[in-house]
Image (cartoon, rainbow, N blue to C red):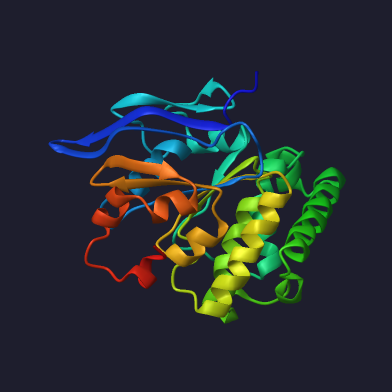
Amino acid sequence: MSLPILEAQLVTMQFGGLVANDNISLSLGTVPGKVTSVIGPNGAGKSTLFKILAGFMTPTSGKVRLFGEDVTGLAPHKIARKGLVRTFQETTIFPELTALEHVSIAHQLSRSTSDLNVFLGSRAARNDEQRLQAESLDILNFLELGAIADSVAKNLPHGFLRLLGIAMGMAAKPRVLLLDEPYAGLNPDETFRAVEVTRKIAATGVSILLVEHDMKAVMSISDHIHVLYFGKKIAEGTPEEIRNNPHVIDAYLGKEDEDIGL
């Protein structure tokens, strides 16, 4: 019997008297390469849940399991080594470095030489650096970003920086990729391209958990959706089921249907 790829079991997160997540359970299932989304209005608890899943917060109660292993509260870099990697709403960049250099830096989990060898500039370290650069270029090419490999980050438009953040996440060789609002601030053409990139990654067998406010994008790409509202999970299902769920419609009451994709 296959174990769930990633699951939260009755996760609760309290900050004093505030309950940000209230007994939330969700699973990415057992089939890799699916896109699961978490949606909800501002303040629903989406970002808190993301931080818990990736190890940036330890829940007040509940468990997080990755491929059946309890990783609750494990440090983020240790969770990343086990195959779960997250991106952030804002891509942290070094303005003077190229896109290729950013992805190469993100490749450090794959480095095979010691810090001492890197410091001494040994042949093994130089060979390792060449390997990491080649792998980084492969990622950029795969995400159709090869043309900007040598472009300095400060000169890249917002849409490319968003995709660069995803490329940096891919450098850690994830089996599960958590994307935190990857389409925020993008125009329709940029969103379409980013959605296609997300599909392309999922097609390689990487399971994706997506937090996103762009409901049209979410509805077009998701295999399964979980809906949070004031810290509680109020619904889950396929995009079609979510569109027709009265609890979801109530949660988004006051917004135009076409704005939220319902």
Horizontally, residue 128 falls left or right of residue 45, namely right
Q: Is residue 72 left or right of residue 142?
A: left
Q: Nearer the viewer, residue 38 or 184?
A: 38
Check the image and report above or below for 258 versus 101.
Answer: below
Residue at image coords 40%, 56%: 243
User: In the image, residue 126 lies at what x, y percent?
Assistant: 83, 51
Quarter of image, res 15: top left
Task: Please report the residue visible at 36 percent of the width from the left and 31 percent of the height from the top.
Answer: 58
Residue 73 located left or right of residue 118: left
Q: Nearer the viewer, residue 50 or 121?
A: 50
Can residue 249 be seen here? yes
Which quadrant holds residue 116?
Answer: top right
Viewer-proximal residue, 52 or 25?
A: 25
Figure quadrant of the C terminus: bottom left
Rendering coords of residue 239 (x, y %): 48, 53
- Residue name at image x 56 percent, y 44 percent: 85
Residue 174, given in percent of the width and then of the height, sits at: 65, 43
Location of residue 159 with respect to 212 vertically, above or below:
below
